[in-house]
Amino acid sequence: MHDVIVVGAGPGGSAAASFLARAGADVLLLDKSDFPRDKVCGDGLTPQALYWCDRLGCIDEVLAQTQGVIHDCDLFVNGRRVLTGGFPDGTLYPDFAVLLDRRRFDHTLMRNALANGARFRAGVTVRGIERDAQGVTVLARTKEGPASFRARLVIGADGVSSSVSRAIGNTLKDGVMAVSLRTYYRGVKIEGAPIRVYFDRDYFPGYGWLFVDDAGFANIGLGYAFDRNFPLADLAACFRRYVATELADALRGAERCGGVSGGSAAFYRPRTIVDDRVMLVGDAANQADPLNGGGIHKAMEGAFLASLAAAQALEADDLSRQGLANYETLLSRHVECDWQTAEIFLAIAKNPNLRDFCLFVLEQIGRMTSEDPRFEAFCAGVFSGVLSQSIALSPRALYHAFPRGRSTWAAFLAANGGPAAPLRLARGAAAGLLAAGRGALGDPLPNIDWGLEVATKALRLGSRHISAWSGL
């Protein structure tokens, strides 16, 4: 009988195992794969991910495996570079990111969990769980045949197709999803920032990425968000066009190494992430950032909060849903407002009828930030999550961040045609909204459903802000 069994040794699972083992719990970490193993991802470790690596005590090992640090990112909209942005300084997090493939990164985190006292078993495919008054039985299949493991508590960190999540009544892949394709190249030489993010109407809502380290090793990929109202586009065709057009110059002379792999993530709240003797973290709890798709640091953050609640419940010997409910309280206090804010942005952007308007707005924001470092740091911080994303809806924060210098506005107007800029901007915005209106009228039912969804989420977030203000 272990104190805790963690199912899944990705960033969330290994982090939870480390935090709990460090607190004195008897932890068994299970994974279906032998390590090291690959995982489809952009491989970018954001400032937040590096912060959590530091908290876990493995930051030196992580950085020792990387080739250079990344301070800047180039943003492209419809083939045009509109800004170069960086990570803001003066926050809890470092002002740089690094690239490290998941094969090495996840292996590092798993070894760190073992160094903290957890035990690990590979080749275990979990099929379900059975709970009773004394504990949880994890039912699995191994190379040797059926197997079972016992613990007082199970933490499901087994990804978007989580068997643990399904066992506590969640319906999987029943909301906003994103799928992505990724491959690697070596010998990549580019000018400018080593991270490039591409927004284009062919694959919006979604974006393409190109991440290059100092050795010329590149991770390239393309992701797309969809739901039942707005189905998935032909992602494979979009990926081929993206590589052949947007990346033609960057990949000239480079060599692809390995095939194209696919992955998925979910961006909706499951029915529950806590039940009797069960908790969920990471992609099993759909904790990835809806605004930028980042899941690594969110999984590690969720694992830390889950470990606090789990340690408390183990000490009190109350592993009921009520005994573990502090996990939900901690999430609500620390991350829920930002998550709901990002969810609203994704809910608006996922409507393909709005792609022209959304891309128009992105391009104008990019032009404005290129002339105002303070506004650029604000926008880059919100998109990356280094700054609290909820401040994007705060009138006070927007007022302080919005450009007010004459030179900034003069350059912005010049980039949009000089004296005719206000008219051109109005026409651009109107054209995007008219296109959205025509698309909505052509297929009204999904768009009505979408409008109700956005309104409901906005009201929920507004109620949360009102409750917070009432408590001040």
Image (spheres, rainbow, N blue to C red):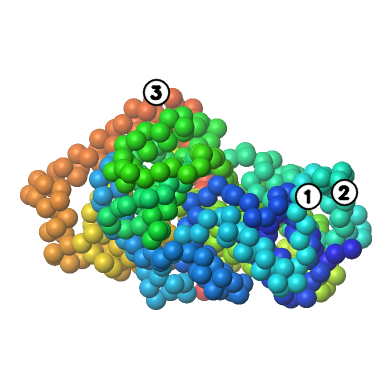
Query: Which of the pair 419/78 is nearer the observer?
Result: 78
Image side of residue 189 versus residue 270, left or right: left
Q: Is residue 184 visible?
A: yes
For mark 3, give the secondary structure. helix
Q: Is residue 305 above or below residue 435?
A: below
The reply to whether the C-beta atoms of the residues labelled 3 and 1 are less than 8 Å apart is: no
What's the residue type where badge 1 is placed? Val
Quickly name the residue at label 2: 147
Q: Amino acid at mark 2?
A: Ala
Secondary structure category for the residue under label 2: strand
Quadrant location of the N terminus? bottom right
Question: Is residue 439 positioned above or below 156 on the image?
Answer: above
Structural crowding at the residue carrying mark 1, measured as other residues with C-alpha within 10 Å and reported as few (<14), some (14–19) or many (≥20): many
Relative placement, left or right, of 270 versus 425 is right
- Residue bearing the label numbered 3: 442
Please provide percent x and percent y for residue 14: 67, 62
Tell me whether the residue at label 1 lies in contact with that at label 2, contact meaning CB atoms closer than 8 angstroms: yes
Q: Position of residue 379 (x, y in %)?
A: 35, 60
Residue type, label 3: Gly
Q: Identify the residue shown where x is 81% and y is 69%.
A: 26
C-alpha gap between disc 1 and disc 2: 8 Å
* Residue 352 visible to the viewer: no
Rate crowding at label 3 as few (under 14), some (14 to 19) or many (20 or more) other CA atoms within 10 Å: few
Residue at the spot of label 1: 124
Determine the CA span between mark 3 and mark 1: 49 Å
